[in-house]
Image (cartoon, coloured by chain):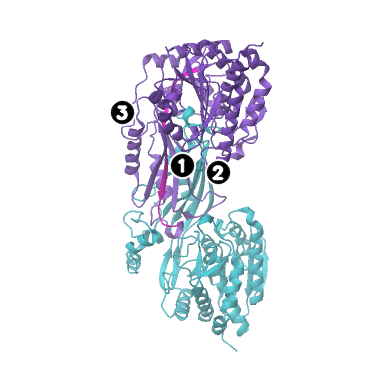
Chain colours: A purple, B cyan
Amino acid sequence: MPTPYEYIESHRAEFDKELTSFLRIASVSADSKFKPQILEACDFVAKKMKSAGLKTEVIETEGNPLVYGEWLGAPGKPTILIYGHYDVQPPDPLDLWISGPFEPTVRDGNIYARGATDDKGQMYLHLNAIEAWIKTVGKLPINVKVLIEGEEEIGSVAIDRALPGLKDRLGCDAVVISDSSMFGPDQPAITYGLKGIFYFELFVDGPIRDLHSGTFGGSVKNPVNAIAEMLGKLVDAEGKVQVPGFYDDVVPLSELERGSIASLPFSDDEYKREMGVDQVFGEKGYSTLERRWARPTCDVNGIWGGYQGEGAKTVLPAKAGAKFSFRLVPDQDPAKIEAGVRAFIKSVTPPGIKVRLEHHHGAAAVVVPLDSAPVKGATRALAHAYGKQPVYIREGGSIPICSSFKKVLGVDSLMLGFGLNDDNTHSPNEKFCLKDYHRGALAIAHLFEELA
Amino acid sequence: MPTPYEYIESHRAEFDKELTSFLRIASVSADSKFKPQILEACDFVAKKMKSAGLKTEVIETEGNPLVYGEWLGAPGKPTILIYGHYDVQPPDPLDLWISGPFEPTVRDGNIYARGATDDKGQMYLHLNAIEAWIKTVGKLPINVKVLIEGEEEIGSVAIDRALPGLKDRLGCDAVVISDSSMFGPDQPAITYGLKGIFYFELFVDGPIRDLHSGTFGGSVKNPVNAIAEMLGKLVDAEGKVQVPGFYDDVVPLSELERGSIASLPFSDDEYKREMGVDQVFGEKGYSTLERRWARPTCDVNGIWGGYQGEGAKTVLPAKAGAKFSFRLVPDQDPAKIEAGVRAFIKSVTPPGIKVRLEHHHGAAAVVVPLDSAPVKGATRALAHAYGKQPVYIREGGSIPICSSFKKVLGVDSLMLGFGLNDDNTHSPNEKFCLKDYHRGALAIAHLFEELA
């Protein structure tokens, strides 16, 4: 009888094949025309859970369905809840992909496809670890619940609303999530902090119709000029967000944490080369890693208005729009931030212009204590799988559900990322290193044992 | 034997049918994929000129071809050069058209199609007037040359370069152009001033690839934030263009002209209703008509960057872009404006960003004297056709070739517009009033007689 670890080693080809099939499904949650693929991906996950040996159920919500599975045959042992998502970001801009976003392709040991690392590959390796234990030992050393959702990329709205009703069923000692990155190649990490988020969409209306910019220019406010003026005031030249009260509740970084971040091997020069920029940019007084991990930020994520085609069109457009979002840190309150942004937008709206501000989703930041049993177990499990001690990092990304798990279930989330910073998450040519896909499954298989 | 005027009255149906066929041709010059339609429209015009009785020739250029026709059988009489264009603006946004942009449709006495008023309908009525004289009287009372180009909507580059080589052939006493508007319904006008233009396209590059705005936000300058900041500084809250030196060469409006503009029936309240805005906007200290006709302006004509699809995508985009243009007045020099704008863009480019500024086209403003023989003749011709004295107006639009005609041929352009301000030029649902299409031909037929 092989061990679970041997099973994982000998089943790499099967695991890769399954992931490839999973990645072929264009389960984009942001665009409703991909609803059939959302359901197909949900079904794919349910089948895998069942075949891995979990008691599996698809739970309908007001949005995309959840897939839930459990194995509870270890009375007296801890219970963990593994969380992940089967939905992916939109693949735009399509013309920058080397191979199609939904035609998974392996190059240099990486599998390229939308969702490869975020979060299909990282989520699926947990199911591989469960399968390895049940198919070899016949059982798991701890109790495991798995909850996979289909709206993480659009703010986890449906799961968030369903969570209170599932409270008893989901009871656990810790949540485990793999939806983030290691510190670098071959350097495993435990992510102990995530930023929160507030995402807005702004609609700006000027004249009732597109106008000739020669005949009518200078007579009515141009909505594209207006939106540029408004968004141009969001952040100052020193990287400081200009929304009044924005920094009021920000918990300052402790000297201990600043020291710990400064001790990590990170070079601005190397980072600039990697990013292709001649200068880093951000809030004055903080290092690049501090700004990325632990300071709130504001980015315009998209903008449009007027003529975008070839050549010159002399139009004074009737409307313009933009998407912009804030990343939040403890203890910024999303509701307070929303109110502040609404007041700010009102204050910078020029005369002759109508604006409408919609919000897509919001979530608070989370930071978890490092001295807990799950963190200690995960530290040992990662060291087993990688032959190297993990480092403790924070992340600028948001997993909105973490703060809900804390609120509803009363437990912290253990974030074990197996991705890399150059995985092109949310960008063209997203990838996941297959070696980490396999080592990740090994680490999770060890985690079960360590937590027992 | 009918008179030319009777011929025009009795041939309305034929003229309408021909215009309809002409408008079916999608001769968009801004987008190279419409090149076959450009050539088809060129050919259509050449056929009409020939059948109207002109000696006709297609003149190749480095860009789209010119159509040239002449009738020079009136020695000792004045010679006019009629100028127009067979190319049209792009039809975007397509979804706002009630009937297709290239499916001409008559509603309430107006013909709806891209190019209906700008400039296919207004140009074609000249050919109808020529045809009316030659088919009835057998000759024209003056010498007439006709030059129709195919790049007016993209800056008249090819004709501008070809002009010096055609100088002897095009010699004339005045240029006549119908590519503007009347003052209002049933109120004919002679346009004695046009603005110039300088049109730019700005490309802003940040990081080498699209980034996850959570993981990387706060570490590199976001190009969409950057372009908003930059464009937001172009015009201040009081409508003043912020490019240093921009107003240096502007000829102030004379008290006489301000009085004349103020005497025209125009109401800001009615204008606001028509435009669907709650406030007019523009340079402080000038009336709406003054700003539209005689003060320089700046409009962003298009902007793009990041995610424009449905829902939320948390991306820090790699690039952004915009098109923006300035309308110029006497004596602003396009070359000086270009240099000023380049210096301004450089001065507002934030660190960590690369910019590239391209210029599409430039032209100086023109203002022609009102006391010339052609203007006097046109005044009488319009009064004949409309039964009402014309008013003298300026226009915010640009006809870049006017200043070239002045420079190369040494003659002023007589601008007799038959469009209306609500013709949706450069917008969806462009139209031309068929009554003015017919009255315009009558006015031009009278003009030939008045100039003789």
Label 2 environment density (alpha carbons within 10 Å; few <14, some 14–19, many ≥20): few
Disc ID at residue B345: 1
Question: Which quarter of the rendering shows the N terminus of chain A?
Answer: top right
Q: Which of B262 and B311 is in front in this view?
A: B311
Hey, what amino acid is under mark 2? Lys
Taking the magenta stretch, the answer to whether it contains residue B358 is no
Q: Which of A45 and B15 is in front in this view?
A: A45
Q: Label 1: chain? A: B
Label 1 environment density (alpha carbons within 10 Å; few <14, some 14–19, many ≥20): some
Real-space Cα separation, disc 2 to disc 3, in angstroms: 41 Å
Asked if badge 2 and badge 3 are on a common chain, one would say yes
Q: Which residue, given by chain and number where applicable, does mark 2 sit on? A: A33
Q: Label 2: chain? A: A
The quadrant where residue A240 appears: top left
Task: Please tell me whether mark 1 sits on a helix, a strand or a loop.
Answer: helix
Hey, what amino acid is under mark 1? Ile
Q: Which of B271 and A38 is in front in this view?
A: A38
Task: Please tell me whether mark 3 sits on a helix, a strand or a loop.
Answer: loop
Span of residues in magenta: A190-209
Callout in the foreground (2, 3): 2
Q: Which of A50 and B91 is in front in this view?
A: A50
Q: Please report whichever mark, 2 or 3, sits nearer to the chain's N-terminal start.
A: 2
Disc ID at residue B430: none
Q: Residue A148's spot in the image, x, y percent?
A: 52, 28
The quadrant where residue B387 appears: bottom left
